[in-house]
Amino acid sequence: AQTVTQSQPEMSVQEAETVTLSCTYDTSESDYYLFWYKQPPSRQMILVIRQEAYKQQNATENRFSVNFQKAAKSFSLKISDSQLGDAAMYFCAYRSGNNNDMRFGAGTRLTVKP
Amino acid sequence: DAGVIQSPRHEVTEMGQEVTLRCKPISGHNSLFWYRQTMMRGLELLIYFNNNVPIDDSGMPEDRFSAKMPNASFSTLKIQPSEPRDSAVYFCASSLGLANTEAFFGQGTRLTVV
């Protein structure tokens, strides 16, 4: 099965600064999709951004953008102009285009300092 | 739509007891996932269903765990007998049967086995 690795258990950033969360994955598939989810203390899982593996252009959603390096199997999330409300657990996810399953990394806890 | 509905929200049980977690997916979704979240292991995929059929249950930790999906609107995850190490938050998620679509999560069930 595919594996997703988030090597940073915790990260912190100063309010208004930029932070990058790392994610790598292991797969032999060519058809797949990548996602970042946010989990605030409420425990709710919220989609932040998604990336199709066949697209070379990096996805962007307002202050959130990704750096997708397909050859390196890397999918990092950049948060610009960090806000206090960005404090949460962030999970990277891989979804197979072949069998449709969806697997997550262990998560990175982001703290935003005022 | 009410989203994915899980019950109960919290469950405290004694070791050795049977525990049943319930999930109602979003109407029209034909993929359903069960995850377990712990501090140590993050979000682990336990089992997932496509069109009510279990596709991959390799993540189920032991024979004490079982999951069913008798119809498109209901799934259960059962632990029998429960053990303290089963204490975790259990999430159910559903999605359309397309790999480029996000999974929508329920609020989770926090299980404590004493």
Image (spheres, coloured by chain):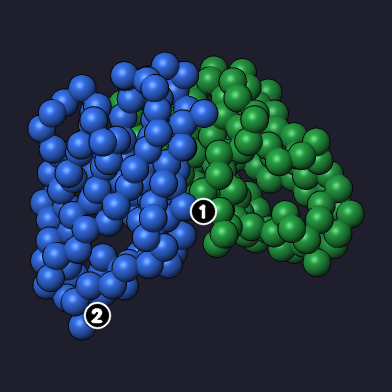
Chain colours: A blue, B green
Which element is circle 1 on?
strand
How far from the left and from the top, in percent, is residue A83?
19, 70
Q: Is residue B110 above or below residue A77?
A: below
Q: Residue at x 81, y 40 (%)?
A: B64
Image mark 1: chain: B
How far from the left and from the top, in percent, is residue B46?
61, 38
Q: Nearer the viewer, residue B85 or B67?
A: B85
Residue type, mark 1 in image? Gly
Q: Which residue is mark 2?
A: A113
Q: Nearer the viewer, residue B43 or A11?
A: A11
Image mark 2: chain: A
Residue A52 shows in this picture: yes
Q: Is residue B68 left or right of residue B80?
A: left
Q: Residue at x 34, y 43 (%)?
A: A24
Q: Nearer the viewer, residue A64 or B110?
A: A64
Q: Nearer the viewer, residue A104 or A83?
A: A104
Residue type, mark 2 in image? Lys
Density class for disc 1 (Cα within 10 Å; few <14, some 14-19, many ≥20) is some
Q: Is residue B93 left or right of residue A94?
A: right
Q: Residue at x 18, y 45 (%)?
A: A66
Q: Residue at x 24, y 48 (%)?
A: A76
Q: Is residue A38 left or right of residue A60?
A: right
Q: Is residue A26 above or below residue A6?
A: above
Which element is circle 2 on?
strand
Of all residues shown, which one is farthest toward the right?
Answer: B16
Q: Quadrant of the C terminus of chain B?
A: bottom right
How far from the left and from the top, in percent, is residue A8?
37, 60
Quadrant position of residue A29: top left
Q: Which residue is mark 1?
A: B42
Of all residues shown, which one is farthest toward the front?
Answer: A72
Task: Name the disc covering residue A56, or none.
Answer: none
